[in-house]
Image: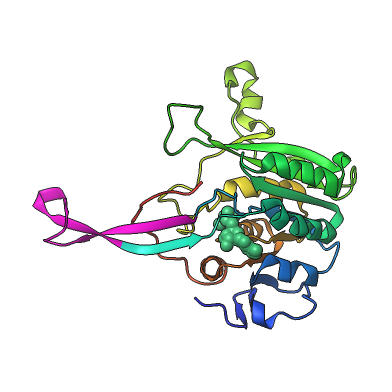
Amino acid sequence: MAADAAATVGPVRLLRADALPADLRLDDDLLVEADSLDVLPRLPGGAFDLVYVDPPFNTGRERRLRSLASVRDEHGDRGGFAGRRYRSRVVSDLSYDDSHEDYLAFLRPRLEQARRLLASHGTLYLHLDYRESHYAKVMLDELFGRDCFLNEIVWAYDYGGKPRSRWPAKHDTILVYVRQAGAHHFDADAVEREPYMAPGLVTAEQAARGKRPTDVWWHTIVPTRGAERTGYPTQKPEGVLRRAVAASSRAGGWCLDFCAGSGTLGAVCRQLGRRFVLVDVNPAAIAIAAERLGGEAPARPARPARAGT
Ligand SMILES: C[S@@+](CC[C@H](N)C(=O)[O-])C[C@H]1O[C@@H](n2cnc3c(N)ncnc32)[C@H](O)[C@@H]1O
């Protein structure tokens, strides 16, 4: 679905770069196809409970996800049950550029805006990996103040190839900063509990209730055949974002993702009764997010060729 200059899909308003008003009012949820730096200055300061952003990780290469389906073809190159032949057909081929000459110069003005947009009780979640997280932390200490650092969350997963020459890198880092030290909203009881690692060491009652998650989040990647799978490369699991949104935003509060990809933050906001603004420069991302949030579910790939993180 292409984003019209200003259209409404369900309760979401779609906007495109060439039709951005000088001031973006927060009434409908928004899905904006534009460079985030053109959008963020138009949003009202102090309006957001939470900013979650999962920018490109600066891997130095295009991030691409081709999804394949098997179709019957008597001349196909693959054999199947009862002598049937099949060939693979590409059902979607999505990508975005992930190579930045000066990555911090890309991030800095956007994070300055993120700070301006947060309410005094608001919180930033910046999702990165080992390539840039340390440099970004130093920058956020400078922009937000070291006293506004709340957590370094490790999202650990176990999927994909494992090199034998080093420890396989199987975690992302989410840096968490609050707008104003000591004033931030954090609802520990709103977060879904998880099983104890050693339930034999706690009472049966505690084991049944589960434990509150710590700053290390074991969570699977988006399953290749899972219902939430959109086919967008590097799509993040709703379960990971759900923790952040549940803990750090209030019911009905506004949340922002300015590198929104397939719209995972919007999907989670819907589940938890929050409002959202999603921005992405890639038309393919906005089309997927629009379908996910406002229209019919996207067609499911029968056999994704490669999974993102
Ligand atoms: C890692 S992906 C986000 C994936 C998303 N969290 C999800 O669950 O689908 C990063 C996104 O940032 C977008 N992006 C890169 N540069 C951008 C910019 N200047 N403004 C807005 N979006 C940008 C890319 O198009 C890509 O969709």
Q: As rendered, which of 15 and 17 lies closer to the eye?
A: 17
Q: Quadrant of residue 41?
A: bottom right
Which residue is at a point 79% across and 46% down the rendered structure image? Answer: 140
In x, y percent, where is residue 94? 45, 62
60 sits to left or right of 135: left
Q: As rendered, which of 110 and 43 lies closer to the eye?
A: 110
Q: As rendered, which of 29 and 101 lies closer to the eye?
A: 101
Per the rendered image, the range of residues in magenta is: 62-89
Q: What color scheme is it?
A: rainbow
305 sits to left or right of 192: left
Q: As rendered, which of 295 and 148 lies closer to the eye?
A: 148
309 over 31 or under it: above or below: above
Q: Quadrant of residue 14?
A: bottom right
Report if residue 171 is visible in the image.
yes
- Indicate yes or no whether the magenta region holds residue 86: yes
The residue positioned farthest toward the top in the image shown:
201
